[in-house]
Image: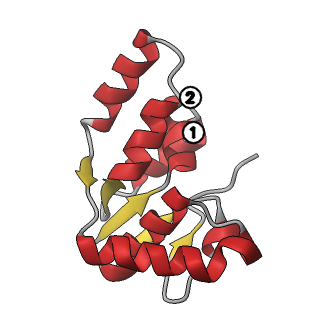
Amino acid sequence: MNVFLDTDVLVDCLRGSSTAKVWLESSFEETFQVPGVVAMELLWGCRNQTELDRTHSFLNSFDVIWPEALEFAHAYELMAMHRLSSGLSIPDCLIAAMAVARSTRLYSFNLKHFGVVSGLDVQQPYSRS
C-alpha cells in the first residue's frame, strides 16, 4: 500500500527519533512516498550546507511524488473552503489534494488542520512522548 509521509514525520526521522525509526522500519507492508512540497519544506528548513546535503540524501531513499494539474485545482478549492476557518496552509492543501486524488493514506501529526478535509485518510503514525 502506498502512503504519504508529512513533513513532521520526516523531521522526527531526520532528528534521530528512535520511535520514528522503529515505526518506519516496522512498516514494511507500506510503500512510503513523499509529496514534492514536503520535500521542499524539508529543504527549506535546512540551516547550512551540511544539513541540506544530509536531508537531500535522506529524501533520495523515498519516491518523491509531484502534483498533477487537477490536484493543484483541488488544492485551490480546499484553500478557498478552509483557509479562514482552519488555517490550512498552501503546502497542506497540496498534500491533502494529492492524497485524496490518489486514495492514499497520509501519516501526519497535523490532525487538526488535515481533519477538515473531506475524504482524506490521515492518521498519526506513532505516539510521540
Residue at figure coordinates x 63%, y 67% from the top left: 88
Neighbor class of circle 2 (other Cα within 10 Å; few <14, some 14-19, many 20+) is few
> Please, is residue 99 above or below residue 27 in the view?
below
Q: How is the image coloured?
A: secondary structure
Neighbor class of circle 1 (other Cα within 10 Å; few <14, some 14-19, many 20+) is some
Residue that numbered label 2 is attached to:
15
Residue at figure coordinates x 54%, y 44% from the top left: 20
Quadrant assignment, res 15? top right
* Amino acid type at image mark 1: Asp
Q: CA distance from mark 1 to mark 2?
A: 5 Å
Quadrant assignment, res 99? bottom left
Give residue 69's position: percent from left, percent from top. 25, 71
Give residue 43's position: percent from left, percent from top. 43, 31
Q: Is residue 111 left or right of residue 106?
A: right
Q: Is residue 69 left or right of residue 6?
A: left
Residue at figure coordinates x 46%, y 74% from the top left: 76
- Which one is nearer the viewer's eye here, 50 or 61? 50
Give residue 63's position: percent from left, percent from top. 23, 50
Give residue 1's position: percent from left, percent from top. 28, 72
Please tell me whether mark 1 sits on a helix, a strand or a loop: helix
Residue that numbered label 1 is attached to:
12
- Which one is nearer the viewer's eye here, 21 or 95? 95
* Amino acid type at image mark 2: Arg
> Please, is residue 43 above or below residue 99 in the view?
above
